[in-house]
Image (cartoon, grey):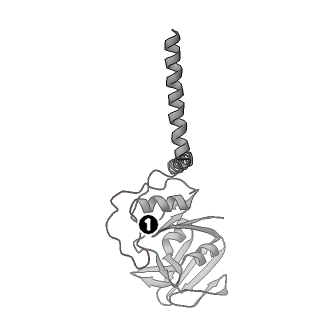
């Protein structure tokens, strides 16, 4: 019996020595493991599915779907856009992704970068938040109304009108393949919305929400 106890004690001592030695030889192991656990926890907190194609970014062309489908956004609030951008990047997507109220917005004409400003299709974003949109072909003017506010945008004009007050534009609205593209931040903020974004490599995620 004494011999058996001695052997057990020796085995336990050997096990502790090996384990402690391994960590002593590589003190970063625990930190790496904790970081891995945090990353995996963060990923599981993200939406499980994302539908639709990611529009190409500036100077990029993107056709077909990525080899790894990206899960669709199914939550109203995206807590960490940076993590979401990273998830899209790792799935092989590139370009600009726009969320309205935390839900993915898909466009037949993709968002574009012009002189450092993001232009997005007006009607899709405006109607997502319940705005009324009308286009006058004769004057090439778009009228957007929401919550008592009226915005007038004329294609290729250097200024807009917000509640009958002239407002300069860094980049004018433009027509692309039958769609009116407008400066994202201008239209969002003048509709009383908040804009947040995150970028990871070639992927940019923009989230437009109610303030």
Q: Which residues are magenta?
A: 48-72
For the point 54% across and 91% down, the residue is: 157
* Residue on which disc 1 sits: 106
Residue 81 in the image, given as x and y percentages of width and height: 55, 61
Residue 51 in the image, given as x and y percentages of width and height: 41, 58
Up the image or down, 59 lies above or below 66; here it is below
Q: Tell whether 164 sits left or right of 142.
A: right
| Magenta segment includes 56 | yes
Up the image or down, 117 lies above or below 55; here it is below
| Magenta segment includes 146 | no
Whether residue 11 is visible to the viewer of this picture, yes or no, is: yes
- Determine the image quadrant of residue 159: bottom right
Residue 1 in the image, given as x and y percentages of width and height: 51, 8
Q: Residues within 10 Å of mark 1 (few under 14, many from 20)?
A: some
Up the image or down, 127 lies above or below 37; here it is below
Who is closer to the viewer here, 145 or 1? 1
């Amino acid at each position: 019996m004494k011999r058996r106890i001695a052997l057990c004690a020796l085995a336990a001592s050997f096990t502790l020595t090996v384990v402690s030695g391994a960590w002593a030889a590589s003190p970063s192991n625990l930190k790496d493991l904790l970081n891995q656990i945090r990353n995996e926890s963060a990923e599981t907190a993200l939406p499980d599915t994302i539908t639709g194609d990611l529009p190409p970014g500036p100077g990029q062309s993107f056709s077909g779907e990525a080899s790894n489908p990206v899960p669709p956004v199914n939550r109203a609030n995206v807590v960490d856009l940076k993590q979401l951008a990273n998830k899209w990047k790792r799935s092989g997507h590139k370009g600009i992704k726009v969320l309205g109220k935390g839900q993915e917005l898909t466009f037949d004409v993709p968002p574009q970068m012009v002189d450092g400003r993001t232009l997005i299709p007006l009607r899709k974003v405006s109607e997502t938040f319940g705005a009324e949109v009308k286009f006058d072909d004769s004057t090439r003017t778009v009228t957007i109304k929401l919550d008592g506010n009226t915005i007038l945008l004329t294609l290729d004009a250097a200024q807009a009108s917000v509640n009958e007050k002239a407002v300069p534009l860094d980049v004018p609205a433009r027509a692309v393949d039958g769609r009116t593209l407008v400066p994202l931040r201008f239209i969002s903020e003048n509709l009383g919305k908040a804009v947040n974004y995150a970028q990871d490599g070639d992927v940019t995620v923009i989230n437009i929400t109610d303030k």
